[in-house]
Amino acid sequence: MTRLLITAVLLAVAGVAKPTEPILLPGGDTETLDMGRTPEWVIAVHGGAGVRLREEMTPEMETDYRRTLTEALRAGAAVLDAGGSGAAAVEAALRVLEDAPIFNAGRGAALDSTGMARHDASIMRGSDRDAGAIAGSSRIRNPISAARAVMEQTDNVLLDGEGADWFAAEQGLEMADPLYFQTPARRQSLLERRAAEPGTVAKANVSGEAGFGTVGAVVLDRNGDLTAGTSTGGRTNKRFGRIGDSPIIGAGTYAANESCAVSATGHGEFFMRWTVARDVCARVELAGESLSDAAHHVVVDTLGAVGGGGAIIALSPDGEVVFSMNENGMYRGAMSSDREPLTGIWREDALE
Ligand code: ASP
């Protein structure tokens, strides 16, 4: 009886706790970057949608975001310039962002409701639509490397939890103590989120929250092949066992040489239900839409209308880079054989 009463009280508290509402800006933007007339290779990266508010961003922080995005672009570019594969380039770029504590992936990943960082990552190759992913891993230092190993070394697509950790160790990838991933800022975010949502786990997306910062990359290599990859800690205070869109092929990541490469960031449940990454590419492939129209239709017109906050980066087979977002911004950047690195943060700003 007493136990029933306590449960009822807890449920009541959980029921009245107001979930944080998504902060979607009206409308949205889709921006196409000119990467040169016939670039031999192209890379675009993102560090998550829902960026810090301009007034909360110090010049030092802004420099740090832009410097790290540029470093990631250059790491991927070095691979592409030397004729390396798209998968190697995506891995090189995302490892830089995973190692940087300012992004929600690898070290500095958002913590779940048990206080642990559990990582989701995926990669897809557009030439043959091979793909690899891991979900809910807690010991792999660079989750994108494990996703690539799943793609290249197994005939599976997705490994989860302990199995993913075990596989990565067997592959000789660097493993890390779960404490390695935890940063003071993420612990603080978890405490704040728990206080704001007592008795519940994360329900909604919040723009400008430090818990965001999923990372992703899309590349066109010298062979003319497209590749996409995404890596994340998910969402602060996510339910134990919750998996988002980032390791789901067709939702957070997709690549097909016939249409496009996409890496997404945002409220994962919406990106899964609307199969966002595949939908953008399908519109290009099957409906003959331009990449920019397809991205805008899915991210701004469709997701924006239903409250699915987020953004994508997309790349066409001829090297056109598209950024589409329905939030206040996305940490993002691009570079090609013809163009030096450009980076951007807020939605209304051109890349510089
Ligand atoms: N899409 C990620 C997830 O829902 C989070 C993000 O991109 O910010 O797990």
Image (cartoon, rainbow, N blue to C red):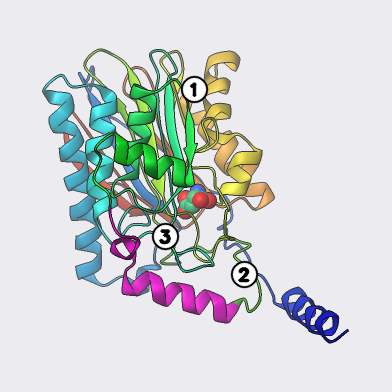
Q: Is residue 40 above or below residue 77?
A: above
Q: Residues within 10 Å of mark 3 (few under 14, many from 20)?
A: many
Kindly identify which residue carries mark 3.
117
Residue 198's label in the rendered image is: none
Horizontal side of 36 relative to 301 (left or right) equals left
| Camera-side residue of 62 and 252 | 252
The answer for how far apart the CA atoms under marks 3 and 2 are is 21 Å
Residue 20's label in the rendered image is: 2
Q: Earlier in the sequence, mark 3 or mark 2?
A: 2
Residue 13 is situated, as x and y percent measured from the top left of the image, at 74, 81
Horizontal side of 207 relative to 287 (left or right) equals left
Kindly identify which residue carries mark 1.
290
- Residue drawn at x 52%, y 20% is 284
The answer for how far apart the CA atoms under marks 3 and 1 are is 38 Å
- Residue drawn at x 35%, y 61% is 178
For the residue marked with disc 3, what is the amino acid?
Answer: Ala
Q: Earlier in the sequence, mark 3 or mark 1?
A: 3
Disc nearest the viewer among 3 and 1 = 3
- Residue 337 visible in the current orientation: no
Give the structural element (helix, strand or loop) at label 1: loop
Q: For residue 189: magenta?
A: yes
What is the span of residues highlighted in magenta in the rendered image? 176-196
